[in-house]
Image (cartoon, grey):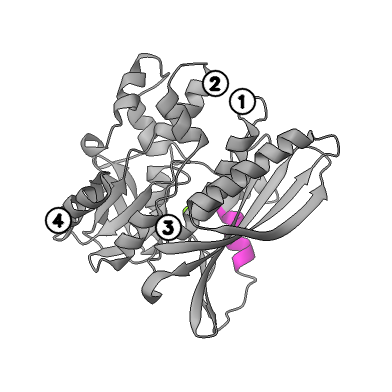
Amino acid sequence: VTDLSALGEFGLIERFTRLLSAHPDVVVGVGDDCAVLRCGGSHWLVSCDASLEGVHFRRESAAPEAIGWKAMASALSDIAAMGGKARFALVTLACPPDTDVAWLDALFQGLSAAAASCGAVIVGGDTTRSASGVVLDVTVIGEPLGGRWLTRAGARAGDAVAVTGYPGRSAAGLLALEYSHDAPVLIEAHLHPVPRFAEGQWLAEQTGAHALIDMSDGLLQDAGHVAEAAGLGLDIDPGRLPMARELEKARAWLPGDPAALILGGGEDYELIVALERDAAPALCAEFERRFGLPLTIVGTFEEAGGVRVGGRGYDAAGFDHFKG
Ligand SMILES: [Mg+2]
């Protein structure tokens, strides 16, 4: 393999990871939503996330405030995905010298509004010139509550696959923007995702919750990461997918089946959790009572590797930055 598009995003990460050495204070290293680092007597959750013009956003279709919001929210979501509390953020911004200052002011407003909404403060960063397009990179630092966190890696065979809220809305919102459809709830889900902090923190306290991840790349791909981290596979029951009312209504104009957006659409930043089978129904009921949001059992982690939908292999696994 000589070309990155053949190696793929996950092949590249694996190749780099082989070069890293272990360190006693790295409690969780590469391969989870955050690194968990031992610092003095406590632990820190650390992650970063890049947003590039032309790859993650287009200036023509998104307001600068929304671009900033999403860059910050998607980075902070990785702390929610460990069940942690957001604390600090650093922002690196690269842009061409002719970038409009009012546009940048609005971008920064979005970044800081999203940070504030999650309880984080921006404490620094870097600014530099870019040869083409705007590049944002957000580093986030969080704190595990009560010294507890949930990694991707604890799922057991027989555990339920459960998902918060209504995934698929963000992908549908992007299509609504592209096709100029009036679907404000879906568009809002795409432009202003809200990380599930309170929900993640509560899940991390439950002994019946074994593994946690946030949905950045789609239900199948992200649930697949949880399965893979535990050496398992999974089967999703297509009859149990939580369908948002707005997504059901969008059937009228969507080019395909909305279920495909739930399975393969990214950027919802909902959480996927592996739940002990016997405890799952009560945990879902308590979750819904507490947060006014569904936690839906959509499938099962299984001994047999691979990702299945209704018992059959499914070939639309999320997003790889370098493939196709
Ligand atoms: Mg993540």
Q: To which residue does mark 3 refer?
A: 81
Q: To which residue does mark 2 refer?
A: 178
Label 2, residues with CA under 10 Å away: few <14, some 14-19, many ≥20: few
For the residues labelled 3 and 1, the Cα–Cα distance comes to 28 Å
Residue 225 or residue 149, whichever sits in front: 149
User: Is tag 3's residue or tag 2's residue first in the polypeptide sequence?
Assistant: 3
Label 3, residues with CA under 10 Å away: few <14, some 14-19, many ≥20: many
Q: To which residue does mark 4 refer?
A: 282
Find the magenta span and give its range.
Answer: 10-17
Kind of residue indicated by mark 2: Glu
Q: Are marks 3 and 2 in contact (CB under 8 Å)?
A: no
Residue 61 is marked as 1
Query: Can residue 315 be seen in the rendering of this structure?
Result: no
Select label 1 or label 2 by which is in front: 1
Q: Are marks 1 and 2 in contact (CB under 8 Å)?
A: yes
Residue 186 or residue 115, whichever sits in front: 115
- Residue 183 sits in quarter: top left
Residue at mark 3: C-beta within 8 A of ligand 1:
yes
The structure residue drawn at horizontal position 63% and vertical position 54%, both measured from the top left corner, is 138
For the residues labelled 1 and 2, the Cα–Cα distance comes to 8 Å
